[in-house]
Image (cartoon, rainbow, N blue to C red):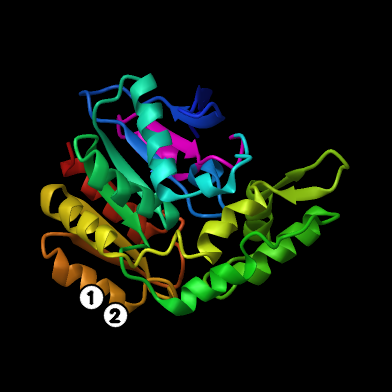
């Protein structure tokens, strides 16, 4: 498996932010890929996908969105919104001299990608939206709102794995114990007292609870149309998803008839993108992307 370099950069408002930088394998020059994770997740969600993409010859950057992973927590929770997150991505790209990139956005990462399309379409060469769109199901939104920001510390890795299993088993019914342990080690880290704490600021959930992260606005629908009409887009949907159900996916396909679409069997929100169906679709998409 490929290694990565840890890089840090400073946001426009002074936060220290982190990303993983995977060097692309040799071959013809291709645009880099920027991976953006979901609401309570972090860059480690891509530690299997990113090396696979890098092996295709593309540089991959997996970002820890502010307040997650190794990025600094924001003292102002009002900044935990897609508009601010998109600004951080623009700063990362600018600091690294990246003028255009292919984006892979899981859940919230897809909202950030659509926000970028509205503000800086020049930066977005193509996009993979993972189980997210400008219209979503209230059922899945309520489930996520029910646990986001409410996770306390736990005393053991076994307890951490049990917690991760409890909130995700409905979406990943076939995961085994080693897989849940792997997810737990991505999601938790020891705190100063030696207990295991989630690797995110609980205040990130405030935007979700107050509706600031709710992807149902007219501007976001317009951003999706702009993205899908002007750039290649692949929509990946978990067949069991309760956030992007068949009805919402059908709306997106009608709104963007040129969009590529794939259902990932046996998983819900959101596919890890290492599932054979998802990975095959991404590899084929990247083969034709700039």
Q: Is residue 49 in the magenta section?
A: yes
Q: Is residue 156 above or below residue 74?
A: below
Q: Which residues fall within the magenta stretch?
A: 47-71
Q: Is residue 260 left or right of residue 64?
A: left
Q: Which of 241/83 is in front? A: 83
Camera-nearest residue between 114 and 79: 79
Of residues 121 and 38, the one nearer the viewer is 121
Q: Residues within 10 Å of mark 1 (few under 14, many from 20)?
A: few
Residue 94 on the magenta segment: no
According to the image, label 2 marks what residue?
247
Where residue 68 appears, x then y in whole percent?
59, 43
Residue at position x 45%, y 37% in the image? 62
Q: x and y percent of residue 56 in the render? A: 30, 34
Query: Which residue is depicted at the point 63% across and 47% down?
Result: 186
Viewer can see residue 77: yes
Determine the image quadrant of residue 222.
bottom left
Disc assigned to residue 250 = 1
In the rendered view, does 141 fall on the left or right side of 157?
left
Residue 274 in sight from this viewpoint? no
Provide residue 167's location: percent of width, then percent of height: 63, 69
Q: How far from the left and from the top, in percent, is residue 256?
A: 15, 63
Q: From the viewer's perspective, is 175 left or right of 140?
A: right
Establish if 213 lies above or below 48.
below
Residue 101 vertical placement versus 288 (above, below): above
């Amino acid at each position: 498996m490929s290694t990565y370099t840890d890089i840090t950069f400073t946001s426009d408002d002074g936060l220290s932010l982190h990303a993983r930088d995977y060097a692309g394998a040799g071959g013809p020059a291709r645009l880099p890929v920027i991976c953006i994770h979901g609401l309570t997740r972090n860059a480690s969600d891509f530690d299997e996908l990113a090396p696979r993409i890098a092996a295709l010859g593309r540089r991959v950057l997996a970002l820890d969105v502010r307040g997650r992973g190794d990025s600094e927590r924001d003292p102002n929770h009002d900044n935990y919104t897609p508009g601010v997150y998109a600004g951080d991505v623009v700063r990362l790209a600018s600091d690294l001299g990246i003028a255009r990139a292919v984006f892979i956005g899981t859940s919230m990462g897809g909202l950030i990608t659509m926000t970028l399309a509205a503000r800086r379409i020049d930066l977005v060469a193509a996009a993979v939206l993972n189980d997210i769109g400008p219209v979503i199901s209230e059922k899945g939104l309520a489930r996520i709102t029910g646990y986001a920001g409410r996770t306390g510390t736990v005393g053991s890795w076994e307890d951490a794995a049990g917690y991760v299993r409890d909130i995700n088993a409905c979406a990943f019914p076939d995961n085994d114990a080693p897989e849940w342990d792997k997810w737990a080690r991505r999601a938790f880290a020891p705190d100063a007292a030696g207990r295991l704490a989630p690797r995110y600021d609980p205040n990130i959930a405030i935007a979700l609870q107050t509706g600031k992260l709710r992807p149902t606005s007219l501007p976001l629908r317009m951003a999706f149309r702009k993205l899908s009409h002007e750039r290649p887009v692949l929509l990946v949907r978990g067949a069991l998803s309760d956030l992007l159900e068949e009805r919402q996916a059908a709306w997106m396909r009608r709104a963007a008839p040129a969009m590529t679409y794939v259902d990932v069997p046996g998983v819900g929100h959101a596919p890890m993108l290492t599932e054979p169906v998802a990975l095959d679709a991404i590899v084929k998409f990247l083969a034709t992307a700039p």
